[in-house]
Amino acid sequence: QGYKGITCFIVDGNTPGLTVSRSEKKLGQNASSTCPVTFDNVRVPSSNIVGGVGFGYKIVASMLNEGRIGIGAQMLGVAEAALSYVVPYTMERKQFGKRLFDFQAMQHQIAEAAVQIEAGRLLVYNAARLLDQGKPVAKEAAIAKYFVTETASQICLNSVKWLGALGYMKEAPVEKYLRDVIP
């Protein structure tokens, strides 16, 4: 039956045979739990079917699109946090008698990061607007997630570099931001 044979259903957390194991220890994104789930002879009543038999793929695809927009928004926030942390540092830290921010190459890199963040914001907002209007959003959600995830990864990596040795230390949050955006 292919994708038409997929059905979504709700399984109560107290259902016999359902086991949710302890949260995995991950490199990043520790604010969200990742837990193994095991089904051992789990019985689910037909009243727990969501959306009807055979409509599961449509439901899952819709959830993936919404999830992509949400991930894009999260990555946008992380990129903004990294840039917000590093720019004041470049205005205080001096090398060769000048603030880091006063070097033209640094200004170009920071400006490029700011442009990428704004472009990503527009992509995320557009996908969210289309979703709110009930319009097809698969392409726009995928583009927004891809673009902002790549942007956040690059900005966070650059932030670690711009801070020098401090960027590698736990006292500066950018090392955590980098771990959180690694795709």
Image (cartoon, grey):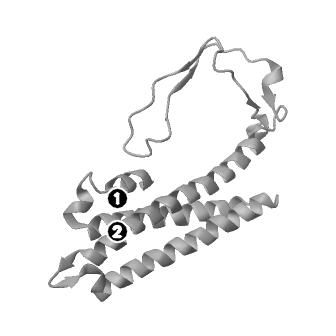
Instruction: Give the residue type at disc 2.
Output: Val
Relative to 57, say whether 80 is above or below: below
Considering the numbered disc 1 on the image, is that residue within a helix, a strand or a loop?
helix
Between 152 and 83, the one lying in front of the other is 83
The image's mark for residue 86 is 2
Q: Which residue is mark 1?
A: 174
The answer to the question of whether label 1 and label 2 lie on touching residues, with beta carbons closer than 8 A, is yes
Relative to 108, say whether 147 is above or below: above
State which quarter of the image contains the C terminus. bottom left
- Residue 175 placed where, x, y %? 32, 55
Instruction: Give the residue type at disc 1.
Output: Val
Specify whether 16 is left or right of 174. Answer: right
Between 101 and 70, the one lying in front of the other is 101
The image quadrant of residue 23 is: top left
Q: Residues within 10 Å of mark 2 (few under 14, many from 20)?
A: many
Identified at 81% across, 38% down, the residue is 55
Instruction: Count the numbered circles shown.
Output: 2
> How far apart, in angstroms, are the residues tagged by discs 1 and 2?
8 Å
- Residue 96 placed where, x, y %? 14, 83
- Residue 9 placed where, x, y %? 74, 28
Identified at 42% across, 32% down, the residue is 24
The image quadrant of residue 103 is: bottom left
Identified at 77% across, 34% down, the residue is 5
The image's mark for residue 144 is none
The image quadrant of residue 121 is: bottom right
State which quarter of the image contains the N terminus. top right
Relative to 11, say whether 104 is above or below: below
Specify whether 70 is left or right of 183. Answer: right
